[in-house]
Image (cartoon, rainbow, N blue to C red):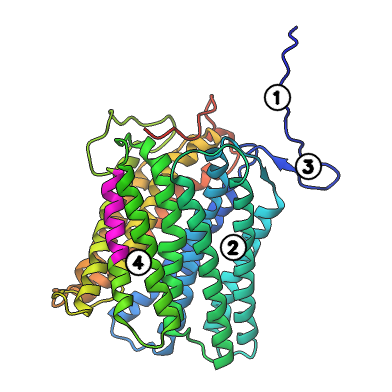
Amino acid sequence: MTNRLEPAQPRLRRSGRYAVTPWAQQHLYRPFVKAAIVVALTLGFTTAVVILILVASGQTIGLAWSTYLQSHGVAQLLGWAGLFVTGVAMHVVPRFRGDAPIRFPWPQRAILTLILAGITLRALGQIAHESPTSEPLLIASGLTLLAGYATFALTLASVLRGGRPSGTPVERWIWTGITWALVAATLHLAITIQMAIDHSPVAPARLNQAFVFAATFGFVTHFLLGISLRAIAGFIRLRPYRQRLELAAFLLIEVGLLTHTATTAFDSSPRDSQQIGLILLALGLILFTHSLRVLEPPIAPRTGAPGSYPRYPWILIAAYCWLLVGAIAIAGHAGATLDWWSWPIPSSSLGLHIVTLGFITMTIVGFAARTLPLFAGRLLHRHWPLDLAFIALNASVALRLLASIDGAPASTRGLALSGPLGLVAIFAFAITVWPLLSDDPKFALSDQLPVLPTSQ
């Protein structure tokens, strides 16, 4: 027998109250990932397929285009991508802070319930705009989404204030991502209130654009870039990132995004500063990719982990290739708008679509294929659906790009096909990872695996 004192363990739930819990003791991410997949397969990618096919067939859908498209955008950004990032962040951020404790489970349950309610209410209030309950539903959507992401921000902030500092810029990206999540949710509330005041089923264009960029590049992208510095850099054996370039990229992204969002939200007409903000944002994304060194040879041979998808590095590297393409598309259109150069793509939203589908969705698929088996020590039962998801997702983004080039042949058919390919990719991803989100013993590994490697 030894007299060595064992470290004190945090108390679990007692007398109906929820206490501080070790970060890995509860699978915080599971309900969020499940909910993200459900949203993607209903209000997200499925809705996009219907809209793209109708447009490609030449049918006039009138007001339905704006209502379905805008509610689809909210579902994709705050539902599919937002819920995935939220759940994974609450699982890995405590690890970044030296296994800092986290409150469980009432904050997570409240966050998930409020975000799902907000997304559903937005869709019901906007699509069923002729109903007398439309305006109350829209306002309720704005309030519940803001409450959900405010609870998320407070929960994650309490974790970041505890534990041990990591000494890396990861926390800078996460803190900023939290701030942008609140900005996006606040802009969404302003949108729903303005829609109710105007008795309009369509969101105000300038507020909606500001919200989309705040949610896409402010909230979701910040979290993915921050996690890339720590987790993805270790997973695919990247060389040490370039610290000064990473800081310069961070500053460019912040200045560009803030400039574009503020001038879009508060000015009634487009200004040159909006386009300059987009160029700065795009330059920051390009510089970050260069600083991460994700396209350079690895520092050591890449090896798969037991139970995970062996070709996950392909997915993650492809995601950053599409981030570069999306950034170039954003800067190209912005510069053409300022008459700085000519640009063959008239679509102003192409760069945004490439980033959301090619970078964000591709990163989610690649990150999940590597980490979900490790989070709970479980086996990825099938690999071929992820192969299909990888091929279909790349083809979907490529067709969207080719269909947007001015004068491209068969652009209408390419646009129509890009939607179903994206849906196929998400469905293949869903059937692969869903068994990892349960306690089915046939997927269990004999030994518990480490959760996250330290970056090189």
Q: Label 4, label 2: how many angstroms apart (C-alpha)?
A: 23 Å
Amino acid on which the number 3 mark rests in the picture: Arg
Instruction: Identify residue type, mark 4.
Output: Gly
Q: Secondary structure at mark 1?
A: loop
* Label 2 or label 1, whichever comes before in sequence order: 1
Disc 1 vs disc 3: Cβ atoms closer than 8 Å?
A: no
Residue at image point 54% right, 87% down: 195
Main SS, magenta residues: helix
Mark 4 secondary-structure assignment = helix
The residue where tag 1 is placed is 7
Label 2 – label 3 distance at C-alpha: 24 Å
Residue 217 locus on image (x, y percent): 40, 63
**Mark 4 or 2: the one toward you:** 4
Q: Position of residue 337 (x, y in %)?
A: 22, 79
| Magenta segment boundaries in residue numbering | 280-292
Q: Nearer the viewer, mark 4 or mark 1?
A: 4
> According to the image, label 3 marks what residue?
13
Classify mark 3: helix, strand or loop: loop
Q: Nearer the viewer, residue 202 or 369?
A: 202
Precedes in sequence: disc 3 or disc 4: 3
Count residues near mark 4 (Cα–Cα under 10 Å), then give few for <14, some for 14-19, many for 20+.
Answer: many
| Farthest residue, direction right | 15
Residue appearing at x 26%, y 72% in the figure: 415
Does residue 159 sit above or below 308 in this rendering?
below
Per the image, the residue denoted by label 4 is 256
The picture quadrant where one finds residue 283 is bottom left
Tell me the amino acid under the disc marked 1: Pro
